[in-house]
Each structure stands twice: as C-alpha cells, then as structure tokens.
Image: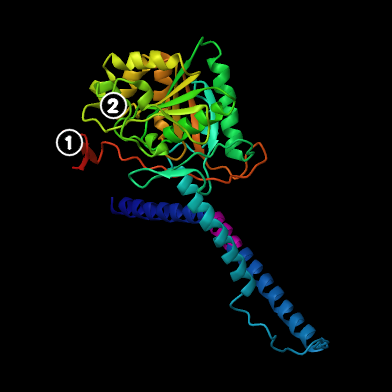
Amino acid sequence: DNEIIALNTQLKSLRDSESQAISRIASNPTQAKNLLSTERQQKVKESLYLFLLQKREENELSQAFTAYNTRIVNKPGASGIPPTPGRRNILAMAFLIGLAIPFGVTYVKETSNTKVRGRKDIENLAVPFLGEIPQNMKDSRHNSKTDKGGETNTIVVKEGKRDIINEAFRVLRTNVDFMCNSVQGAKVIAFTSFNPGSGKSFISVNLGMSIALKGKKVIIIDGDMRHGSTSSYIGSPDLGLSNYLSGAENDISKVIVKDGSCDSLFFLPVGSMPPNPTELLESPRLGALLNTVKEQFDYIIIDCPPIEVVADAQIIDQYTDRTFFIVRAGLLERFMLPELDRLYEEKKYRNMAFVLNGTRNEQSRYGYSYSYRYGYGYGYGYGYGYGTDGKKKKK
C-alpha cells in the first residue's frame, strides 16, 4: 500500500509538471509576437534617429560652404515727413464729418417737421386745388398800411407788375373765374382756414385787387369781427359791418369804403369791435346786406375767421357760393389734411377748394425769383378776450 501511494504521488507530480510544460509551450507564440513588435519599433526609431543625424550634418556642411552674397542697395535714413499724425487722413475725415453733420441735422429737422411743407404734401387731397401763393421775401413799403396792432398789411398786386407773386395771383384769379362761371350774377366767395395766421386777409385783398384790375366790381367784406385784419388795409374805420348789423347804421353806402388805388375795389370793414359778433352774424340783416351788394358788385369776397376757433365761418357759409380754405405751408399740421378731405366729402361747406399759401421754393415754375415777403400775426381768442364794451382786454 505504501508503495502504491508513493507511486501515485509521483504520478501526480509528473502530471503537474506536464501541464506546466504544456502551458509554457502554449504561451511562447504570444511572447514571440510581443518581442517581434518591440524589435520593429526599435528599428524604426533607430532609422529615424540616424536620418535626423544625417540631415543635421548635411545642414551644417551646407552652411559651412555657402558664400554670403548679400549687399546694401540703399543706405537707411529717416524721411522728412512724420509718420503720424496723417494730415491727409485728418483732412479727409474732417471733410466727411463736415458733410455728415449738416446732412444729419437736415434729415432730423425734416423728419421731425410735421407741418405742410409744399405741393408734395397735398398731392393726394380730394379737395380741388386752386393755386399756390409763394411767400414774399421782402417787405414792400409801397401802398402798405399798418393796423392798430402794428401789423403791416401790403397790397402786392399792381397793374403791369410781372413778378412771381403777381403772376401767382393771376393764376389764382383765372382758376377762381373758371370755378365760378357756373354761378349766375354776383359771386359770393368766403375765405377761411383751420389756423389763425394762414394769410386769409392777405389773399382776400390781393385776389380782390387782381379781379378788380380786370374791370370787375369787387367788394371785400371783413367777416372777422374779432380781429379785423382786412379792415386794417384801409385804416380800420369806425363805421362798418358791425354798425350795420347792430342797427346803429342803416345806410349801406356809408359803411362801404372805396380803395384809393383802384376804382373797382371796395371794402366793407368791421367798424367797431362788437362784444357779440356771432349773434350779429346770425341776424337777418346779414342776408339783406348781401342781397343788396349782390346787385352792385360782380364779386363779393368775405374774409372769415378760422373754423377751428369760432363758428362765424359756418354762419356765413349759408350765404356764399364757394368756400376757399387757405392752407399755410409751415403752419398747418399734416395730420389736419384728412380733416380737410372729410369736410369736402361731407359737404360741410359749399363748393370747397383750397389755396396753398406761403411756399418757400427758391425758384418757381414761371422762371421768376421771389421778391416779396409778408408777415402775419394773429391775436385770436387764445390769449385775448373781449369785454362788454367791445374792446380787447388781456386775460
């Protein structure tokens, strides 16, 4: 038994030795593969190192045997012009800024301007356009009168004159004649506006003078009994429309004033400033007065107050044939133009048309340069009131 146990132990030991030998033999290919890979890497690195060493030696040899052939063409030296500041660049930048500033200011000014500026702003209106009156560029001292407020009123339309403003009023007169041809007998025309200071009195008087120069009898009635700007053209006499409407004067001929410069032009001034102008205009005597003057004159021009201030223009409108609105460039806001169209479409006033006044173009289409100027101030009820005696008093 002991012998058998010893033999079995030896047999087991031999089998273990055999398994270890087999595992070592099985691992030999893997070890050989790793060794081969490591050997290849070493050979590649060795070859690269030898190549770099060879190139370094070649570079050193080429530098040692290269002859230097560089030479100085020009001697270095400083120029007489400083590199900075660049004068041309500064001048160019200053020129560009000088152009940009005025253009920018002009653009901002035109963009922020909400007033009517000229013909381009009124091209889309449905209201008939009568004509354009340019702004006078200088005061005419001839045949000018000053009202009580110190305002200078000038009749610029003269017989034989051919300047731009006379030609403009002739064009306006022709258009007015064309529009009024359908009216039989005397033509009653009312002038009004949205704003005070639009130039109603100036256009009324000068248009009346232009028509009178054709030999037509014209009377200009100052229907603005709060300001009386038309009356100032003839010195603001004490007798006038208010005296007749109130019954203080029954003879119409005594309140009508003939213009000294034209035999066919007459005025009906306001007279005494009344404390109740609206009530006077609503009296039947106004209709009787207009019926009387229709028999004596070809054209009756009524200067009315602005429609946005008082109701006088609406009262006078029932006696008129046509109503002409004055649109003053640089005064009327552009957002008010649709309101003018609305009045025309709703026929609030009879046979409406409008006149563009105070344009500032440098040259007109007629080829004349502007040579006159007129100023307009309007002391309406915004800052003034009226006492019971009919005189103005400051609030």
Q: Magenta span has 30?
A: yes
Residue at 51% across / 57% down in the picture? Answer: 101
Residue 387: numbered disc: 1
Please state the horizontal and vertical placement of residue 361, each as a whole percent of the image: 57, 42
Please state the horizontal and vertical placement of residue 260, each as a whole percent of the image: 49, 35
Disc 2 target residue: 242
Image quadrant in which the C terminus is located: top left
**Displayed quadrant of residue 120:** top right
* Marks 1 and 2, how far apart at CA: 16 Å
Residue at 53% across / 24% down in the picture? Answer: 129
In depth, the one of 132 and 2 nearer the eye is 132
Q: Is residue 301 left or right of residue 57?
A: left
* Mark closest to the chain's N terminus, 1 or 2: 2
Region of the chain picked out in magenta, as a range: 28-37
Nearer to us: label 1 or label 2: 2
Is residue 26 visible in the rendered image? The answer is no
In the figure, 212 relative to 315: above or below? below
In the figure, 230 relative to 376: above or below? above
> Residue reaching furthest left?
388
Residue at 39% across / 19% down in the picture? Answer: 343
The amino acid type found where label 2 is placed reads Ser
Residue at 67% across / 82% down in the picture? Answer: 81
**Displayed quadrant of residue 14:** bottom left
In depth, the one of 141 and 22 nearer the eye is 141
In depth, the one of 47 and 247 nearer the eye is 247
The amino acid type found where label 1 is placed reads Gly
Please state the horizontal and vertical placement of residue 63, each as a whole percent of the image: 77, 85
Q: How many other residues sit within 10 Å of disc 2, few (<14), some (14-19) or many (≥20)?
A: many
In the figure, 281 relative to 379: above or below? above
